[in-house]
Amino acid sequence: MPLAVYILGLSVFALGTSEFMLSGLLPPIAEDMNVSIPRAGLLISAFAIGMVVGAPLLAVATLRLPRKTTLTTLIGAFGLGQVAGALAPNYAVLFASRVVSALACAGFWAVGAAVAIAMVPVGARARAMAVMIGGLSIANVIGVPAGAFLGEHLGWRAAFWAVGVASAIALVGVVTRIPRIPLPENRPRLAGELVIYRDRQVLLSVVITALAAGGVFCAFSYLAPLLTDVSGLDKGWVSGVLALFGIGALIGTYIGGRVADAHLFGVLLSGLTASTLFLVGLALFASSPVATIVLTFLLGVSAFYTAPALNARMFNVAGAAPTLGAATTTAAFNLGNTSGPWLGGAVIDGGLGYASPAWAGAAMTLVGVGAVALSLRLSRTPGTTSRVVARGETATAESAKNTTADCV
């Protein structure tokens, strides 16, 4: 695995910390900004909306630009967005800073994932994505709980400043350690990339990814008030439970990355089914502190166990357009991260309590299981393999060979 892939994973740590740390900061943000917790939860959706819109737009806008220059610019812009959030005088400015940060984050994910995939053989795609997603998992182990800790002791703005510092460190890593990534001789064209959207397997992959992410983060986004108001835990427990979710995520990413290349559909079916069961358990036993803590850990395992497979599946079906494929996956994940917290806030506003987002999330992942089953059935039907994929496998393999040689 090229060193550049690990540097990308390190950068994702800063991105992931910012994306998910609000789960432990909603109460203090809501109090400081004089808004309700569900409205504060919309800040999570704001970030996700920026990711949904920004991933394909920036992938297209930077399609013919040098990869390293693009990554450097985007991680720098992301860091400035964190500073703007830390200085935000009101809710509207904070909301806007989240959208701007998300645009930069989305572009970095899309370009970074395409670079990582290009540097490894086709059979190692899930492992390469597991390294990048590992940065996200470590963010949940260290970054998110640290953000909650800073929010409790130094105020929520301190968490934004900390992510700004982490972004600066990531910027140094990208500038000094990411090699020059040459563009292919035949430069990609937008029309050639857009053809992937004619493939129903690509569209199914978007649906599956959105449901998988949305179901988990429907419940996870409101974990802090669930722990304190339903499970009866002191607010000091929140950072520790968030860390436990992150440890589960790290374990899940490692296992999923190891087995997904060989058993992709098996990972998707088993992971989504497990997430559904854990979410139902969380809804049923939310009043038990021990059960809530254990189920939060298990949910972290199952959610991130599927992540490498979800990424690899998109690259497999969108092989002719790796950059737009990566952007589409990023957008799909954050389509789920948008709809999930929104749905969770809606059921809370409906008077159903802080345990209700777990029920709503379970419904989303259950539909996701059905979508995976449909995708598997279509993939086994003779004549359904698209020519787009066939052309893409050859193009991606050639790109991987050339880029790896240049990087080494």
Image (cartoon, grey):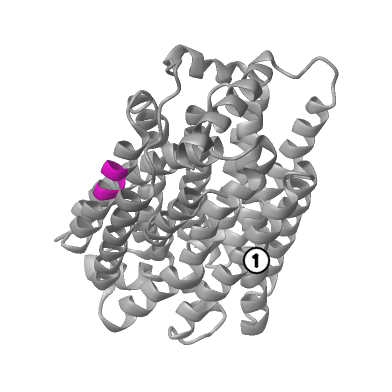
Q: Is residue 354 above or below residue 42?
A: below
For residue 34, say whether it is visible: no
Q: Is residue 370 above or below residue 234?
A: above
- The residue at 53%/62% (across/down) is 137
Our reading of the magenta stretch's main secondary structure is helix
Which residue occupies the foreground of this view, 122 or 13? 122
x and y percentages locating residue 193 in the rendered image = 50, 19
- The residue at 30%/70% (across/down) is 159
In the image: residue 63, left or right of residue 168:
right
In the image: residue 326, left or right of residue 187:
right
Q: Secondary structure at mark 1?
A: helix
Q: Residues within 10 Å of mark 1 (few under 14, many from 20)?
A: many
- The residue at 68%/26% (across/down) is 201
Q: How many marks?
A: 1
Q: Is residue 44 above or below residue 112?
A: below
Q: Is residue 143 magenta?
A: no
x and y percentages locating residue 343 in the rendered image = 51, 50
> What residue is shown with label 1?
251
x and y percentages locating residue 391 in the rendered image = 64, 17
Task: Look at label 1 and name its amino acid.
Answer: Ile
- The residue at 64%/37% (across/down) is 121
Q: Is residue 125 above or below residue 351?
A: above
Question: What segment is highlighted magenta in the picture?
Answer: 72-76
For residue 334, say whether it is visible: yes
In the image: residue 93, left or right of residue 309:
left
x and y percentages locating residue 52 in the rendered image = 43, 38
